[in-house]
Amino acid sequence: MNRMHVVILALALPLNLAAQQPTGPQPNPVTTAFRTRTIGLQRNIAQAFDSIPEAKFGYSPTPAQLTIGYIAQHLVSDNTLFCNAFGAMKREQAAEETTLADSLKAKWPKAKLVGLLKDSFTFCENAFAQLDDAKLAEQTTLTFQNNTRTVTRAQMALGHALDIADHYSQLANYMRLINLLPPTALPRPKTGN
């Protein structure tokens, strides 16, 4: 390729990339920020659980802390609680999910726990599609442990993002204690020059 072609490509590439970038304000920046952050954390959590051997699902650093299996089933419950508040769409649950004690669900096989967790992530992604910035101010009812109160959808979206970040951090620490690297600590693939 001669120098003239290289110069033309070098000048055209930034213009082409700039033309692909959206201009002006994007719709629903707050909802988009919640959704993007939450989906990124969900991806990390799913990858973490996929990489933890089933034999370690009963592990907890101390007897007072949650086991890895307990964290998985707890996240399913939390995802259902928070994402059910995003709109009319509700996550369907099998009777055993709502009637069995959390300590028993925590001992389910890895495949079942991770399957339910990933299903709850998919539900949350779909539930987020019901939200936009204007709907964040809408009131919804939150019932937790026989206590019902009215909150905004924004509180539920923020609560979900904070909760899932907290549990990813917890899981990342557990992984390090069992000599596994959490997804966010893995080497990043090198990009081409």
Image (cartoon, rainbow, N blue to C red):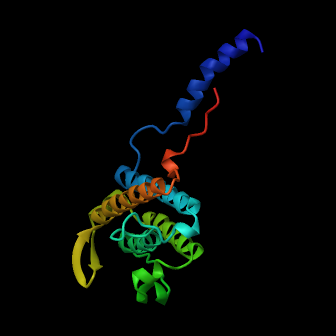
Q: Residue furthest front?
A: 62
Where is residue 69 drawn, in percent x and y?
47, 72
The C terminus lies in quadrant: top right
Q: Position of residue 116 (x, y in %)?
A: 53, 74
Vertical arrangement, residue 125 with respect to residue 73, above or below: above
Q: Position of residue 93 (x, y in %)?
A: 48, 83
Number of numbered discs visible in the structure rendering: 0
- Residue positioned 25% across, 85% down in the render: 146
Up the image or down, 155 lies above or below 15; here it is below
Which residue is pictured at 49% across the width and 45% down the height?
Answer: 185
Residue 81, quarter of picture:
bottom left
Taking 185 as reference, is 114 above or below it?
A: below
Where is residue 31? Give x, y as percent: 37, 56
In this view, the residue farthest toward the top is: 3
154 left or right, relative to 67? left
For the N terminus, the quadrant is: top right
Which residue occupies 36% across, 71% down? 63
Q: Residue at x 40, y 85 (%)?
A: 101
Q: Nearer the viewer, residue 20 or 187?
A: 187
**Camera-side residue: 94 or 184?**
184
Q: Nearer the viewer, residue 168 or 147?
A: 168
| Residue at the farthest right position | 1
